[in-house]
Image (cartoon, rainbow, N blue to C red):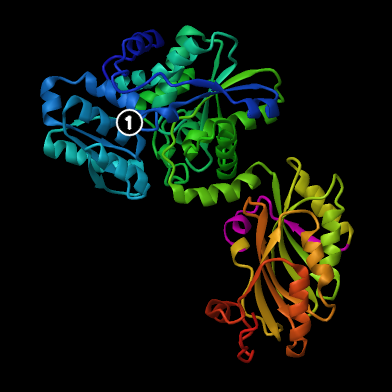
Amino acid sequence: MSKLLKPADYLQKILTARVYDVAVESPLEPARTLSQRLHNKILLKREDQQAVFSFKLRGAYNKMAHLTPEQLQRGVICASAGNHAQGVALGAHKLGTRAVVVMPVTTPRLKIDAVKALGGEVVLHGDSYSDAHEHALILQQAQGLTFVHPFDDPDVIAGQGTIAMEILRQHQGPLDAVFVAVGGGGLISGVANYIKAVRPEIKVIGVQMADSDAMFRSIAAGRRVALPDVGLFADGTAVKRVGKETFRIARGLVDEFVIVDTDAVCAAIKDVFVDTRSIVEPSGAMAVAAIKQYVATHKTKGATYAAILCGANMNFDRLRFVAERAEVGEEREALFAVTIPEERGSFRRFCELVEDLPGGPRNVTEFNYRISDAQQAHVFVGLTTQGKGESARITANFVRHGFATLDLTHDELAKEHVRHMVGGHSPLAQDERLLRFVFPERPGALLKFLNLLKPTWNISLFHYRNQGADYGRTLVGLQVPSKDDATFQRFLDTLGYPYVEETDNPVYRLFLRNQAASPVGCRA
């Protein structure tokens, strides 16, 4: 780059950028529920509503619209985790040129299919953007194509900067800060150049994932730092090394950075959904997660913040993970490992303690238990909470009442794996019958079940997970001697909860049933 462009230079490029052949002026909408909860006005810049569900088409098209006819005739190539790829493919289709797109093999199938649908030629290579970028440069030289960089190009940066131009035109009142997700730095470079040229009092705050914070580390070090690896949850910002130009701009114009984690982003995806009924991708929710963290840290009230929802190319299969982690990320759910005596009545006593917790009863969101020891039982418990930091107080309350407890709310191993692995064969599970129940999601449903149980029937397995419906699906193992079959059937009829007996299910026999147990006939 022969000349270092100043904010005034970028301002001119942004004002004359050619983006509206393919892009629309996206809405700037208030997030009313989130604003009320945070006591600050939160505005959402809806780049998720672009034709390719991302802001990336702005910069890609602006770059391609400035190419010569000869360059367009030869075709273009890019490397992308997905959103830039769709922008290039759409722009190439609009301009009638060939587009080769190199994508990491980790790219969600949704984005790969979208690029192909727009006419792009997809080449999969490497595990990250940086790997794909190196391969794209090789193909560029071999085929004489023009490289369309996803972030480190003045025309791309200027195209992204039109977002800031729209924000300031759409919102005439006070604006304290704009929060921008950062991968390679193209978006924040364009936004920062425009805002600092027009309204320098507005803060520009970059947001990075804790496992993909190349820009933050580079600015802290005073030089570009290459990360050995990057996280892939927010794949749209998974960049190992930021650009030379974007680093120069961010170092000079970005006011500060906020680092967020996966759980915070999952909670932010839910917050956006509550206010918009739209689902954004992890990178698209990073700015909202950062605003929440910023408000909690600085204790602000009455301020106005804008978050750029930069993309909505979410893999549907990820929603299960997002929904599970959102409550923990917001600390609306706390997780515990609780040790209770393996004796009759202790399970009921623990459930009664949950009902009587200070601040009011909590809903049980999860309960996992498998008999394994004659003296002690270890249970994995999830409870709803009323605010951040409450898990420590609940832990102390359990301990005070004689239940040794570990707070697992911030334990990654517990959240990611152990919660799904509580179980196994147990030599203590004699005369075990396994049943799937449908419990109503209301206070007292579990206690009703426990109170109707015959005292001589021991619970040997219990698994429950709240699924957000008005009923919960629960798996229960009960040690019921065969002589009690008739009494047990009366218990089931009196309970009145829908159930299916799974004692003869082959999966239960393989993974959970006492290996020494004799075959049991169907008792359903």
Residue behind mark 1: 150
Could you tell me residue 357's position as x and y percent? Answer: 85, 51
Could you tell me residue 151's position as x and y percent? Answer: 35, 28
Vertical placement of 141 versus 300: above or below? below
Nearer to us in this view, 248 or 465: 465
Q: Residue at x 44, y 24 (%)?
A: 188
Q: Residue at x 66, y 81 (%)?
A: 426
Q: Residue at x 34, y 20 (%)?
A: 159
Q: Amino acid at mark 1?
A: Pro
Q: Which residues are magenta?
A: 402-418
Could you tell me residue 484's position as x and y percent? Answer: 77, 86
- Residue 519 position by quadrant: bottom right
Secondary element at image label 1: loop
Does the magenta segment cover residue 412? yes
Q: Residue at x 30, y 20 (%)?
A: 155
Could you tell me residue 292's position as x and y percent? Answer: 63, 31
* Apparent side of residue 82 relative to residue 481 in the rendered image (left or right): left
Vertical placement of 188 versus 166: above or below? below
Vertical placement of 156 versus 79: above or below? above
| Residue 209 visible in the picture | yes
* Apparent side of residue 71 relative to residue 216 in the rendered image (left or right): left
- Residue 163 position by quadrant: top left
Nearer to us in this view, 437 or 192: 437
Nearer to us in this view, 21 or 492: 492
Tell me the quadrant of the picture where the C terminus can be found.
Answer: bottom right
Does the magenta segment cover residue 339? no
